[in-house]
Image: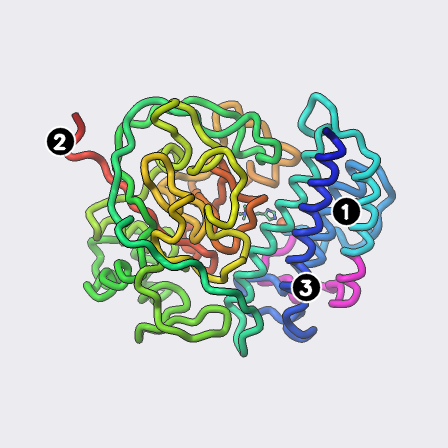
């Protein structure tokens, strides 16, 4: 039983490392140390930061071993240095960073072989390894966003996602009543996903697919970005100050650039690279609204037949290639209807994968929240500053994506792989 857990953990560590290496080997040393956007760290910072977190939590904390490099901790502490300042730090160079993460990993595999994994408490069940796998995969998604901001010729390639099936675009009624939100049993669930608790969610309608580029283009063509009516006050202020006219990476002529390729915007694919303010304005223009976080999770997990919450919309099975566009297999969102096997019992498609979906909810702890292993993972971000996003994107690995997984970001963020799902209240008399 624990041999199996050890082996699976080793595989997950390896998969994460393969991806970090692929994303950092794809560019030359000049591109690794360059800051491609003030919004992002140089790729070489992410790489060494991945190794440094692994050293702190697994080598020093779980393994109780001597430090590999105490002298560099402070340069890779994300709280000490905002992204914009990271290039001026005395960072490890590409060669040093690669060798550092390799040294740390060798020690970690040794520790994984010997550490007990059978305690009663989460921390004694290999949770720290799962946390570190997810941390590396989350930085791989961040590094993918850095690649998207990088100028110059394309270096990443991937096969096209599956094509669409017609007729999934619509809305369904999610019946009112209690459901179980969050989890107390999912092994690698992070602190902010815990504990499981009951939430009573009144009946609402949710759209069966994410908002497409074609629909978003209608909003632009209708003057949506210039019409104060659709925007919240902070949203409008930001719209004006930042001069927003469309999703990030669109050129205003029906084309967009993704990973160095300029191509026509695909009408049937989910819109991506929109901030919360744009999602909120689009929803108002559509006479709808963004779902709350609880509505999103109920649509994704609630099985109306059994009354149980599933791990994923399609059931309890881990995500497979037919379920969702995850894991950087395809470097763009798939057209709506491309994943019929991933639909929820109520027929809601593509909740998992493709694009992160903005919710109307501020990031906060669930009732009974306990920070672990450290307050800086989630708790310090609780409050009205950050909005919750759900469902993962084409850039998210399955190990860091669950029906309960919670992401958060500032409402102005657009360099992430974020899109829109709409919901609305039932009209009077519409629900029997
Ligand atoms: C959960 C994606 C918001 O990237 O800031 C990475 C994840 N935390 N290193 C982030 C994270 C620490 C986090 N997000
Ligand atoms: Fe980090």
Q: Is residue 384 above or below residue 196?
A: below
Total numbered labels placed on residues in the image:
3
Q: Where is residue 37 shown, x and y percent of the image?
A: 53, 67
Which residue is denoted by mark 1 in the rendering? 55
Span colored in magenta: 79-100
- Camera-side residue of 85 and 34: 34
Q: Where is residue 161 shown, x and y percent of the image?
A: 45, 60
Location of residue 299 (image quadrant)? top left
**Marks 3/2: CA–CA distance:** 56 Å
Question: How many C-alpha atoms fall within 10 Å of the one at disc 2: few (<14), some, or many (≥20)?
Answer: few
Which residue is denoted by mark 3 in the rendering? 44
260 sits to left or right of 176: right
- Camera-side residue of 245 and 253: 253
Way the structure is coloured: rainbow
Location of residue 166 (image quadrant)? bottom left
Question: How many C-alpha atoms fall within 10 Å of the one at disc 1: few (<14), some, or many (≥20)?
Answer: many
Which residue is denoted by mark 2 in the rendering? 428
Quadrant in the picture for the N terminus: top right
């Amino acid at each position: 039983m624990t041999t199996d857990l050890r082996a699976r953990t080793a595989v997950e560590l390896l998969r994460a490392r393969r991806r970090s290496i692929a994303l950092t080997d794809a560019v030359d040393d000049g591109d690794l140390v360059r800051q491609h956007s003030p919004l992002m760290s140089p790729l070489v910072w992410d790489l060494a930061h991945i190794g440094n977190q692994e050293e702190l939590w697994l080598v020093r904390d779980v393994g109780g071993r001597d430090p590999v490099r105490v002298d560099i901790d402070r340069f890779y502490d994300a709280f000490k240095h905002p992204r914009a300042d990271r290039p001026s730090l005395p960072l490890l160079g590409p060669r040093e960073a690669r060798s550092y993460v390799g040294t740390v990993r060798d020690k970690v595999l040794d520790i994984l072989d010997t550490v007990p994994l059978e305690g009663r408490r989460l921390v004694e069940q290999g949770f720290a390894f799962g946390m570190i796998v997810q941390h590396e995969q989350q930085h791989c998604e961040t590094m993918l966003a850095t690649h998207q901001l990088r100028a110059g010729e394309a270096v990443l390639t991937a096969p096209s996602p599956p094509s669409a099936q017609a007729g999934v675009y619509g809305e369904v009624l999610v019946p009112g009543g209690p459901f179980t939100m969050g989890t107390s049993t999912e092994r690698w669930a992070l602190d902010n996903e815990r504990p499981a608790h009951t939430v009573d969610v009144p009946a609402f309608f949710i759209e069966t697919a994410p908002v497409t580029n074609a629909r978003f283009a209608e909003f632009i063509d209708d003057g949506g970005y210039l019409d104060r009516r659709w925007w919240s006050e902070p949203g409008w202020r930001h719209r004006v100050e930042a001069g927003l006219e469309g999703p990030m990476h669109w050129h205003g002529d029906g084309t967009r650039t993704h990973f160095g390729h300029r191509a026509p915007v695909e009408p049937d694919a989910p819109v991506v690279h929109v901030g919360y303010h744009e999602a909120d304005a689009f929803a108002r223009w559509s006479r709808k609204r963004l779902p709350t976080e609880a509505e999103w999770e109920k649509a994704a997990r609630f099985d109306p037949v059994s009354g149980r919450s599933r791990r994923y919309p399609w059931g309890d099975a881990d995500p497979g290639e037919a379920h969702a566009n995850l894991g950087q297999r395809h470097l763009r969102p798939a057209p709506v209807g491309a994943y019929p096997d991933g639909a929820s019992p109520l027929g809601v498609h593509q909740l998992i994968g493709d694009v992160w979906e903005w919710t109307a909810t501020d990031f906060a702890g669930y009732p009974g929240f306990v920070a672990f292993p450290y307050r800086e993972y989630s708790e310090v971000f609780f409050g009205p500053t950050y909005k919750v996003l759900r469902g993962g994107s084409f850039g998210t690995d399955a190990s860091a994506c669950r029906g309960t997984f919670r992401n958060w970001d500032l409402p102005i963020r657009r360099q992430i792989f974020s899109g829109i799902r709409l919901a609305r209240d039932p009209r009077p008399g519409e629900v029997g």
